[in-house]
Image: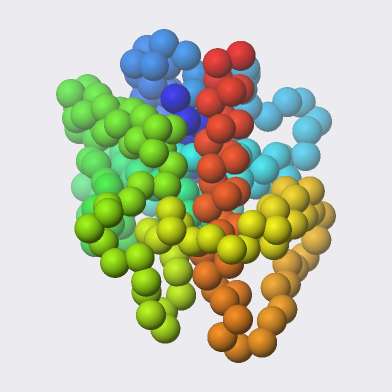
Amino acid sequence: MALIFISHSSKDKERMQKYIKQIEEYFNSKPFFLDVDDEVGLKESEEWEPRLYNELSKCSIALFFITKNWIDSCWCQKEYSLARTLGKEIFYTNIEDDKEKKDEVFRWIGEHIQQSDITNEKTFKKLLKEIEKVSDELLEKPYPWNPKDNPYPGLVAFDKKKAAVFFGREKEIDEIVDKFSYELFSTKAFLILGASGMGKSSLLKAGSCQSLRLENIKRSGKLLKE
């Protein structure tokens, strides 16, 4: 089971408890990071901001419990932005109980394809099954590829969909992954320099980001097995 990062507003702590319990019962474990959890969450006197960002960087799946409080939280928005930047598999679920606020949540979620409105236990179990399916696919096929697809993007940069056929930059990828892993939260910027057309975007999108993602998946699976 790939590691899940759970994002929520601290104001919704009480109403989330029944959903967290269902996750534990469904997977028969705690395959997630939740900041307020006594076992896997933040410890007393721990610096919470770097821990949250590091846990999000290690996870493979991000599950967002969306409410009006979540939308209004600048920290929740930062978690969402980082999850998208790091290419995490993202699931959204609307747990807002106020009708007017619920409509606002749906407007925020917009056109995203992986979403759910939790109204009963059956609906939430369906979401958990989808998360489990995506997790299995991530662990078994980190670089999926259809042999019928054209491997050459032309002038467009290689992206994560073409990671399986991107090659020739192994040394640079390893250097970036090593530096990124150690300095992600200790530096204010990470810069890749190169002349126009040399493949910087491809190196980042199809190479380094996907290698980091694969390493995080493997690390998550190992930690959970232990």
In the image, residue 131 lies at what x, y percent? Answer: 33, 33
Q: Is residue 114 visible?
A: yes
| 53 to 74, vertically: above or below | above
Q: Nearer the viewer, residue 91 or 209?
A: 209
In the image, residue 121 lies at what x, y percent? Answer: 22, 22
Q: Is residue 153 left or right of residue 172?
A: left
Q: Residue at x 27, y 52 (%)?
A: 146
In the image, residue 49 lies at what x, y percent? Answer: 70, 46
Q: Quadrant of the C terminus?
A: top right
| 172 to 46, vertically: above or below | below
Picture quadrant of residue 133: top left
- So how many labels did they put on this image? 0
Q: Residue at x 35, y 65 (%)?
A: 151
In this picture the colour scheme is rainbow
Picture quadrant of residue 149: bottom left
Q: Quadrant of the N terminus?
A: top left
In the image, residue 12 lies at what x, y percent? Answer: 45, 36
Q: Nearer the viewer, residue 191 or 66?
A: 191
Q: Is residue 186 left or right of residue 89?
A: right
Q: Residue at x 38, y 80 (%)?
A: 154
| 126 to 174, vertically: above or below | above
Q: Residue at x 39, y 16 (%)?
A: 27
Q: Is residue 84 visible?
A: no
